[in-house]
Image (cartoon, rainbow, N blue to C red):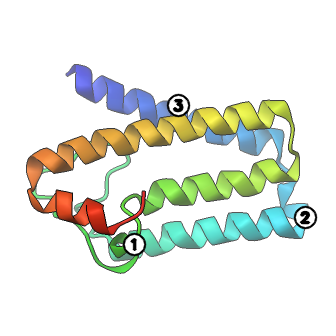
Amino acid sequence: MREKIYSYFLVSVQYLLAFVLLFLNSSFASKAIPLSIFIVGFIVGIYAIYNNKLHNFNIIPEIKDGAELVTHGIYGYIRHPMYFSVALMMLGIIIFNLNIINIIIYLLLLLSLFLKANKEEKLWSKKTPDYKKYKEKTWI
């Protein structure tokens, strides 16, 4: 039960920090470069959802019953494309208004994404021996 609470905590922190960045920088879309970076991140996220199976998809860093390791499409290059997507979108937002508050919030967001990815990787390593080979062939 404690592990599930930790997972939900990480997701809550991630969403809270992302919403704070959006709130503090709501007019980021008025500049071409921040908006472009945000859109690229969004496209990465959509492509990751497209490559994943719906029964695999989970916003918390837990493996659903019956989930399969996805290794094709973007998952053939990036182990955590959804987290990469969030990091890229939020990078677009903070470069709109680069200040110490945005940087600190962004770094905390990256920490929460790192902790989620680390937890998922431990779970996948226990679930399937193929994960080690997959991890060696992919980035983040």
Q: Residue furthest front?
A: 136
Q: Is residue 9 above or below residue 14?
A: above
* Amino acid found under the numbered disc labelled 2: Lys
x then y, percent, for residue 56: 24, 60
* Amino acid found under the numbered disc labelled 1: Tyr
Q: Is residue 88 above or below residue 124?
A: below
Q: Quadrant of residue 10?
A: top left
Residue drawn at x 34%, y 32% as measured from the top left: 7
Q: Which mark is residue 13?
A: 3
x then y, percent, for residue 17: 63, 35
Q: Residues within 10 Å of mark 3 (few under 14, many from 20)?
A: some
Residue drawn at x 16%, y 49% as measured from the top left: 125
Left or right of 30? Residue 104 is: left
Quadrant, the C terminus: bottom left
Q: Which residue is mark 1?
A: 77
Label 3 and label 1: CA atoms lie apart by 27 Å
Q: Which residue is mark 2?
A: 31
Q: Residues within 10 Å of mark 1 (few under 14, many from 20)?
A: some
Q: Residue furthest top?
A: 2
